Structures are given as structure tokens and as C-alpha cells.
Amino acid sequence: MNRLYSLFKMQLNMNFSISALKYRFTREKKKRWEPFVIAAAILFGGGPMYVYYILGMNGLFTIGFSLNHPEMVLTLAFIVTQVLILFFGLFYILGSFYFSHDLDTLVPLPLKPYEVLGSKFLVVMVNEYITAIPLLLPALIIFSIGTGQGIVFWFKGIFLLLTAPVIPLIIGALFVMLLMRVVNLRRNKDLLTIIGGFLGIIAIVGVNLVIQKMPKEGGQDFLKNLLASQTGLIEVIGRAFPPSIWATFGLSDNSLTGWGYFALFIGVSVALFFALLWLANLVFYKALIAGQEVSRKKRILTGIEIARQYNKVTSPVLAIFIREWKLLLRTPIYVINGLTGAIMGPLMILIMFFAKGTGPNVTQLINAIMNPEYSLYITLGGLGIMLFTAGMNIVASTSVSREGKNFWIAKMIPVSPQQQILAKFLQGYSISALGIVTTSIVLGIFIKFSFPRILVIVIIGLLTSVSMTALNLLLDVLHPKLSWNSEQEAMKQNMNGGLGMLVSIFIMAVLAACTVALILLQAPAWVIFVGLGIVSIILGIPSLLALFGVAEKKYKEMEV
């Protein structure tokens, strides 16, 4: 267990770059501002959504309290948290257990399989606290204050919060280990990951549609009838995922029965963890070695084909641009995280459109959109959705980071940093442009935007994307994350992605302020759109100059 603990500390240090951060914030005084910027990005970007979540939890508690079921808020918080961890943790576990780069170093060491797998599992669990704590803590606070709980409640609550990810992650880990032992997933890893990622997006959209179709009027009567049924809502959810009801009764019941449910939850979590370690000694290395046996089809090229391949000549910028796209499309994590932003805008419109008829408010909104009297405001709203789609693109803000330990190649090839950065800029810009064009098509088909309206906002969107992409890429040039063990760390655990979104939101705020000012001045519609185009150009030119001006110096300073 000592070696397991030491290995866990080492991998935790690598996962969060603790030593590097400690050095940076204690020795490099110029970078002490970074934590404040990160905190501002999190608060500014996710703060409003989190406030809505807390208000929703409070409303749920109020309804449950009036129906004598205040513990309903705990049940739903635990079920939502554990199901999300189970679904998204499945792919995280797959990547960490079988596809991380440090396995080639760890496996030859005199370590037992359970020590390697156990340390990786604990690191995954620590990462999942980022999901579990924000989702569970509001429910615990609301229930504690609303029902006047004391220190005993918080003693049990902290234990349950810390162990909440254990059961769903172990279920996912056991499934992955047994599946890898039987099926060689490495051959189809990319396809499975991409399919799983987009299934997750579809599932989120489906949940939104289901919520929209729930009764809007008489909602409290609907819940009252459900809770008054033979089993009640809590028992129904408990049958679907029993650990959620164990946690609920363990927290809400202070009797001996409640302590029994509390012990059951903790005991099952501990027992499953040791079962995972036991199974790791039996199948982990066998599945890992079997997964590394990959056969490739070899095709013999003719002399003419070889000459054609090696005689191709293209510009360095185009060659690197094509390479960037190939690397993006060959890596599932990059595809999912890079292209999801490009479909967010169209998805928002489609959800709103297909929700028509599910409630009077949505129907009134659709009718207002179709009203020519509000043409200017609806057009500006369409532009806002386009810019939101372009701003959610994290490809540019992680472009240099994705080079990882292969960054030395970028320093060795006979291509100037400006040309390499231009190719990366064009790739990020092309994804933003893809999102803008896709959004314009959806606006034309479903919201009946005329071609001139679409053309105007597409032009403004493309102009604004120049500054968004340039500044996002500049962030990654200034502070790339080149040390990572898996592709997931390069994108999802890269603070530049969040900072880039914050920069994009700031640019959108500047355009929104200009728009409001022109509307208050009662400027004609064409003046507003021309003004927005000019502002976009003014923002874009210095952004590009700053990007290319910094690239030469930073490329020489960067070390892997």
C-alpha cells in the first residue's frame, strides 16, 4: 500500500502539474496573476449557469418540503452526479487505464498491476470531484439549512460526498477491464470514442427535449401525484440506481436505520475498490498487452505512385494546415472537443424550434421571431448565436499545446514560426467559419432568414472570428501546456481553453456594447451592421499583429 500511495502522489502531481505550478507561483512573480484570471474565467463563464442550478435545487427542495419529502433534493442530486460520473468517467477510465503515454514507463517497473491501476483510479476519482462537489454541495447546504441539520449531518455528508464517485467509477472500471480482456478495443478505439462522445451530446439534447415536454402548468400537482403514488419518486429512483437512495436515507434519517444506510454506502464503496484491485492483478496486464497487438494492412505502392507521392510540392503553410487537420481528425478527443463548439449554435436553434408547441412561452417566442417588426433584433440575435458558436471553439487556444512532447519537431523543421502559426490560425479559423456557416444554414431553413440578412451577419461573424481566433491562439503561444500524458489533458485539462472562451466572451461584450449604443442613438440598421463590421476589423488587425509578433520570440524560448 505504501508503493500505491507513492505512485498515486506522483501521478497526481503529474496530472495537475503541482510541482510546476508551485514553482511558477513562488518563483516566477510575473505569473502570479494567472490563478486570478483562471478564477475569473470560471466565474464569468460558468457562474450564471451554476446560479441557475442552485436556484433549481432550492425550488426542488421547496416543492419537496411542501409535500413532506424534502429529501427529494438529495436523491436527485446524487442520482444526477453519479450517472454523469458513470457515463463520462467510462471514457476517462478507458483512456487512463489503457491509452495513457506513461504506461510504457510504469509497466516495466517492479510494480504490481493493482498498484498501477489503483493509483490511476484514484487520480481519476480526484478529477471527478470537479463534477461531484459542485453538484452535491448545494443540495447538502439547502437540505441542511432547510431542515435544521446539525454536525452529525455534515459528518456523514462529507464522507458521502468524498465517496460519491467511487461506485459509478468502479462500475465503469470493471466494465472496461472485462471488455478489454475479451475484445481488443485498441483497434477500434478512435471510432468508439468518437461515437461515445457524440452519443453524450445527443443524450444531453434528449434530456433537454424531455424536460421541455414535462407539464408546465400544474407542475406541483404533477409532482404531488407522483410522490403520493404507491412507491413515490424516491423509491422509483432508488430502484434505478440503489446507491442514490442509500445516500439519501443515510443523510436524512438520523435513526439507527439511517446509520445502516450510511454504512452500506461506505461499505459497498470500500468493498468494490478492493475488488477492483484484486481483479487488476488477474486481468489488467493481460488485457493491456493484448491490446497492444495491432495488425496493420500493408499496401505495396507502384513506382508511379511512389514518384507521385514524393514529387508533390506545396507551400509550407498549406502543408502544416493539412497536417493540423489530419492530427485533429485522427484523435477522437480532439474531434469531440474541437468540433462540438461548431455545432452548439445550430443545436440551440434546433432545440428551440422543435420545442415549438411544448409550451405557450416557446410558441410566443417563435411567433415573435417570425414577426417582421422585430427583424433587426432577431437578426442581431442570429449574429449573437453565430459569435457564440465561434467563441466556443477551443482548437486555436490549444493548438500549440497539442504538439506536446513532439514540439521539438516544430523547432527543427525549416519553416518559420510565423508560417507555422499562420497554418494553426487558419485551422482554428476554419472551424469557427464552419460553425458560422452551419448556423446560417439552420437560420435560413428553420427561422426563415432571408439571404441578404444571412449574408450580412455571416460577413460580420467571419470578421469577428479573426480577433477571436488570433487572441485564442496567442494565449496558447504565450503559455502552452506541452507536458501531458493523454490527449484529454491537452484539451480538457488545459486552462487556455477556458481563458480563450473568456476572451471570446469579452469580444462579444464589446460588440454588444457598440450595438446598444448605436440603437440608443437610433441609427439605421445598415449603420449598425457597418459599424459592427468596422469594430470587428479594428479588433482583428492588432490581434493578428500581436500574434505574429510574439510567435518568433516564444517559439525560440519554448522547451518540452
Image: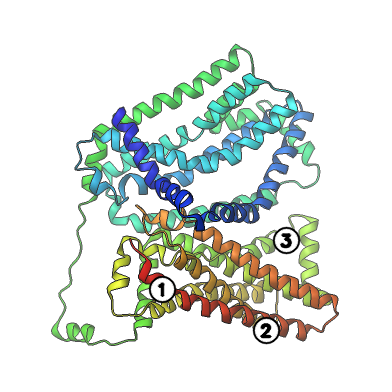
Kindly check if marks 2 and 3 are in contact, taking CB atoms under 8 A apart as contact: no
Report the residue marked by disc 3: 356
Say few, some or many: other residues with alpha carbon within 10 Å of mark 2 (under 14 / 14 to 19 / 20 or more).
some
What residue is rendered at 63% in x and 52% in y? 46
Residue 468 is situated, as x and y percent measured from the top left of the image, at 57, 72
Residue 19 vertical placement versus 190 (above, below): above
Residue 74 is situated, as x and y percent measured from the top left of the image, at 64, 31
Kindly check if marks 3 and 1 are in contact, taking CB atoms under 8 A apart as contact: no
Q: Look at discs 2 and 3 and give the one toward the viewer.
A: 2
Mark 2 residue element: helix
Residue type at mark 2?
Ile
What residue is rendered at 85% in x and 79% in y? 521
The tag on residue 262 is none
Residue type at mark 1?
Lys
**Mark pair 3, 1: CA separation:** 54 Å
| Snapshot quadrant of residue 114 | top left
Residue type at mark 3?
Lys
Q: Is residue 70 visible?
A: no
Report the residue marked by disc 1: 553
Residue 120 vertical placement versus 303 (above, below): above
| Snapshot quadrant of residue 40 | bottom right
Say few, some or many: other residues with alpha carbon within 10 Å of mark 3 (under 14 / 14 to 19 / 20 or more).
some
Residue 160 is situated, as x and y percent measured from the top left of the image, at 54, 28
Mark 3 residue element: loop
Q: Going from the N terminus, do you reach mark 2 or mark 1 first?
A: 2
Q: Look at discs 2 and 1 and give the one toward the viewer.
A: 1
The tag on residue 534 is 2
Q: Is residue 87 left or right of residue 361?
A: left
Say few, some or many: other residues with alpha carbon within 10 Å of mark 1 (under 14 / 14 to 19 / 20 or more).
few
